[in-house]
Amino acid sequence: MRVLIVEDEQDLQNILVKRLNVEHYSVDACGNGEDALDYINIATYDLIVLDIMIPGIDGLQVLQRLRADNHTTPVLLLTAKDSIDDRVTGLDLGADDYLVKPFAFDELLARIRVLMRRNTGNTSNVFEIADLVVDCNMHKVTRGGQVITLSSKEFAILEYMIRNKDVVLTRDKIEQHVWNYDYEGGSNIIDVYVRYLRKKIDSQFETKLIHTIRGTGYVLRVES
């Protein structure tokens, strides 16, 4: 499941990203409205956690633009202002839920689970390429009907690749998406994990799906 965190308080943003990664969510994060709109236009998210008080385009304006563009992704608003007006405005603009700061992470997690369950029928989180099937809801991978067991990092990399199949992903992009603020090393860690994935995904099958783009990164695709 892929989540976008839009939060300008860097410490809180870092904590949310780290904790959600532990819960096996794939997380992107940014700190202002302009970047949030860019992320949303480029990628597909299962949920957006959106702070109202962010620099530039504020959270309510971001939400208004999303709904005007017919984006139906569930939005959970965060606000430091315990104001009825803010809550009513956000809900009227199309927010699915809200949470007032400070909050317990367990409460945020519970609200995320509720919104994810509510939206399961509206958003497909099963991705296929050739005979590889990745079910992001069930955290399950099969190839040729055979169940493949992956670690959380392996699954996060594969999910990112299959959501962007046929797109060349640089090592830096993969590292930033999967590790966020937890990892500050070089790109060798990506090569190591892709090697693990190849052993599990490709080694027993004639059709190879994970391909190296020399000097750039990797792509998940079927090559003739």
Image (cartoon, helix red, strand yellow):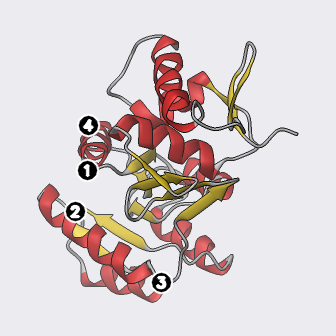
Helix, strand or loop for disc 4? helix
Residue 153, how many percent across, how many down? 38, 35
Q: CA distance from mark 4 to mark 1?
A: 19 Å
Q: Is residue 139 above or below residue 173?
A: below
Mark 1 touches mark 2? (CB < 8 Å): yes
Is residue 30 visible in the rendered image? The answer is no
Which residue bears the numbered disc 3? Answer: 121
Disc 3 or 2, which lies upstream in sequence?
2
Helix, strand or loop for disc 1? loop
Q: Disc 2 residue type? A: Leu
- Circle 1 or circle 2, nearest the eye: 1
- Circle 2 or circle 4, nearest the eye: 2
Q: CA distance from mark 4 to mark 3?
A: 34 Å
Residue 129, how many percent across, how many down? 68, 53
Which residue bears the numbered disc 4? Answer: 11
Which residue bears the numbered disc 1? Answer: 23
**How many other residues sit within 10 Å of disc 3, few (<14), some (14-19) or many (≥20)?**
few
Disc 2 or 4, which lies upstream in sequence?
4
Residue at left offset 28%, top offset 65% = 79
Q: CA distance from mark 1 to mark 2?
A: 9 Å
Residue 109 numbered mark, or none: 2
Residue at left offset 37%, top offset 44% = 149
